[in-house]
Amino acid sequence: MTDAADRRTEYLDQWHAEVTPPDWQNPTPDGRYNLVVVGAGPAGLVCAAGAAGLGAKVALIERHQMGGDCLNVGCVPSKGLIRSARVVSDARAGAAFGVTGTENAQADFAAVMARMYRLRADMSHHDSPARFTGLGVDVYLGDGVFTGPNQVSVAGQVLDFKRAVIATGARAVLPPIEGLAESDPLTNENVFDLKELPPRLAVIGSGPIGCELGQSFARFGSQVTLLEQADRIMVREEARAAGVVTQSLLADGIDIRTHTALQKVTRRGDERILTVKNKAGELEEIVVDQILVGVGRAPNVDGLGLEAAGVQYDPRKGVVVNEQLCTSNSAIYGAGDVCFQYKFTHAADACARIVLANALFPSRQKTSSLVIPWATYTQPEVAHVGLTEGEIAEQGLSVDIVEVAMNTNDRSRLDGDDEGYARVYLKPGSDTILGATMVSDHAGDMIGEMTLAITHGIGLKQIANTIHPYPSNGEMWKKVADEFNRGRLTPTVKKWMTRWLRWSRR
């Protein structure tokens, strides 16, 4: 084997030993649990660790891999690949920064994957059964199945509980397209198992998974075709933001096909032939080596015995919960992707904290109070919090808009990150922030300031009066605030100020 292949095997073994230890011995239940958590993804881990830290007797059940999607097949591996792809892109753009000899930089795909496996393996102990046992949690590996309103069985043992949390997450599902399942398509759950770079890759869907991984694979050297049924990519984001990302993807050589619907897939040896209906309503064929499906998620509710527990659920929407995240069984709560509309790791974390308060104490915290940002980690990144452009239009709301281009920020210009913008939606006639969007290489890091502002009622006037370091990308929000203040300087106000200053010279 090559050196990269040797390292791949080593890191995979290390990762598996942490998240699915083959010699793990489940504990023996000893009395009633304050809290039983079913599912050891982000929501479940926060629930278990938080409850144990408060002194509760806690059991945590996981049937597949500790850490859930985020560690194993989501945030961690994808962002590892994205970082490598950005290095390739930066190297090829070296001439613009006075660095020569890097224009033809190429990615060693095996080494890229080995790096990702190493990082995932090194981070996996944080979510391991051993660590959670050390936190005082009883960890059970196996299928957790509710056998009654206050009982769950796992690996032949029955656990009694005062409260329980369903935190089983969601999984990738394929759209019902003829021949797609038979073509062995890639999803986020198996794309990180690739050993070789696909020469030609079709990406179905232009959401975060499709755009992030599509851009990365294009930079690694794949010929990427991005298929989207809508009239533009990233339909959840502002049209202008999607336009900026579109230009970036085109610059990376991606063939973007909007108004395009996949009709069927057939196999010809190792090739996949996609029959699509294009914008003109005509059928055409696209030949590729692999297909990455970036659309379709389903909640993990099957096989949980929810009927026996008296828990209502929908196979498509997941476990039914109220604003306190309580199910139809008052002893059982839901948290994360299995029940919540926002499918993000940080949203699952926020849900878990609400569950801890409501399930263990006489609290009535609500999900409606949450202010949840999100980011798509393309280059440039797109980040948003609060009301969206689409919601404003749908609800017929009147808002004031303040927008500043990234090319007005000195650090952004120095870094060559000047194609995006920062935009804030305000309550009319005030500095109250209703929503914000940023398009920038560091948008995901910078949206936190707007999230803090909306959460705690901080207006643009206060942000204008807050000193930001210079030169920094984060200074953009101060620029937005300064632009707001300049807009308040009406001709009448300016006239009176001018008169005052003329008089004060006497």
Image (cartoon, rainbow, N blue to C red):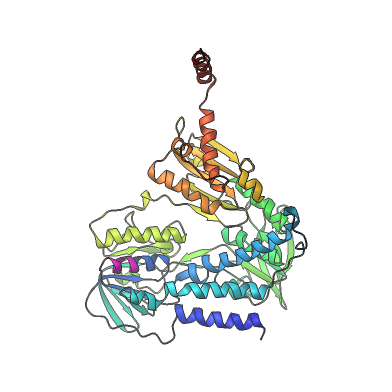
Find residue 252 and report its horizontal and vertical position in percent. Answer: 71, 58
Classify 399 as above or below 252: above
Q: How many labels were placed on the picture?
A: 0
Residue at (50, 39) in percent of width and height = 425
Q: Is residue 52 one of those drawn in magenta?
A: yes
Can residue 419 be seen? no
Residue reaching furthest to the front: 506
Magenta span:
48-57
Residue at (40, 46) in percent of width and height = 455
Does residue 274 appear left or right of residue 72 in this picture?
A: right
Q: Is residue 504 one of those drawn in magenta?
A: no
Quadrant placement of the N terminus = bottom right
- The residue closer to the viewer here, 181 or 190, is 190
Q: Quadrant of residue 143?
A: bottom left
Find residue 499 and report its horizontal and vertical position in percent. Answer: 52, 14
Residue at (71, 61) in percent of width and height = 91
Can residue 337 be seen? yes
Find residue 181 and report its horizontal and vertical position in percent. Answer: 60, 72
Does residue 7 appear left or right of residue 31 in this picture?
A: right
Magenta span dominant secondary structure:
helix
Classify 61 as above or below 403: below
Find residue 56 and report its horizontal and vertical position in percent. Answer: 25, 69
- The residue closer to the viewer here, 127 or 93, is 93
- The residue closer to the viewer here, 248 or 331, is 248
